[in-house]
Amino acid sequence: MEQDFLELVKTYKFLIKLRLRNIFKEENIEKDLKELEKILNLKREEILELVDKIIIAIISHTKYSNFFIKKYSEILKDKIKVPNKVSVWDFIKVSGESRNNDLSLERVEVNKGFVDIGEIKEIYRYELARLEIKKLVESAKRVELPESEEVKEVIEYIDELLKDSFKSVEGVKIEASFKGEVPIEWHPPCIRNILNDILSGGSPSHYARRSFVVYWFAAKFNPNLRPLKDGKLVELSARDITSEKNIEEFIEEVINIFKNVEDFDEEKTRYYIMHNIGYKVGHQRFTHCEYCRNWQNDNGKGLAQYCTPDEICKKKFIIHPLDYLCYMIKTRGKHK
């Protein structure tokens, strides 16, 4: 079985790369497919089905799996046909797995056990496609990927193809007690996990996104900032923490980080960042990152899944994500 898979990768390597460009770069490959139909004596649909299975088997073992699910779902949704009204139970199956607020049951019209999805049909079709592809990817992850030069070549090709979309975040500058570059591994696992989810095209919960944004802001400009001081809530605006120039640059940096999330909207993201760091909109008060205990017992906020404590997290004095960063700066920064 393993040998058969490796033989398929070797045989269809050119076509795999062609299809990857089609999925990720929206490159038109119709002309190539017509030629391949004649050469392989297969129909277009048969060729794509075979190649897509190979791609899923490989990409499920890379950091690009969420991004693939997003891009492939956009292609697949156009092939899914749904009526204007669907069973409320079918709707709940889809909406229950979706983080798109437009699929909330409270926002749609329900009549005699059916949901009118006429105005949100495009979103519904996309979510149907996403759930199907997600299931295939998760299933493929459970199967060990055989090692070979051909598989390695395909993965390297994907790396090259997506290098601009997945520019790594190398670290942040700490202005206060530490003047230097902060490696990603100095940030706590919870923050790194959210960041990886964002960069790989996932869709973290509202609370997870907020926690990342406000942590990233404090880590960059004042890692000593905590929600409470002497038992009282610390109320500050973004301007109390750093300069307007720094704030504007931070907003652009974070918008760029969020560009790969499933439901990215630049205008909404900008407002969301400004609101949470307390800058120009809303109550103009900085929203603090949650204490560690609130990540572990998150009451459905979507934080617990990112909380994967390591040995440093287990130290008694690490009670807030920024404590982890400060500890790393204190113990490792002095060697810089």
Image: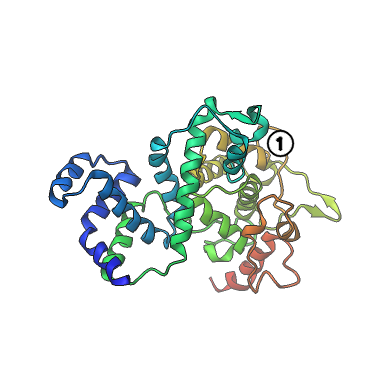
Provide residue 83's location: percent of width, then percent of height. 49, 29
At mark 1, the secondary structure is loop
Provide residue 204's location: percent of width, then percent of height. 58, 49
Quadrant housing residue 333: bottom right
Observer-nearest residue: 249 or 70?
A: 70
What is the basis of the colouring in this image?
rainbow
Observer-nearest residue: 122 or 150?
A: 122
Q: How many marks?
A: 1
Return the residue found at the far right.
231
Q: At x 43% / y 43%, what residue is drawn?
A: 73
Provide residue 164's location: percent of width, then percent of height. 37, 50
Q: Is residue 212 left or right of residue 27?
A: right
User: Identity of the amino acid at label 1?
Assistant: Gln
Return the residue found at the far front.
112
In the figure, 167 relative to 275: above or below? below
Quadrant housing residue 89: top right
In the figure, 58 relative to 1: above or below? above
Q: At x 58% / y 65%, what residue is drawn?
A: 186
Q: Is residue 140 left or right of residue 222?
A: left
Observer-nearest residue: 13 or 82?
A: 82
- Report the residue marked by disc 1: 284
Q: At x 32% / y 70%, what residue is drawn?
A: 1
Q: At x 55% / y 41%, what residue is drawn?
A: 251
Mark 1 residue crowding within 10 angstroms, few (<14) / some (14–19) / many (20+): some
Provide residue 273's location: percent of width, then percent of height. 61, 40
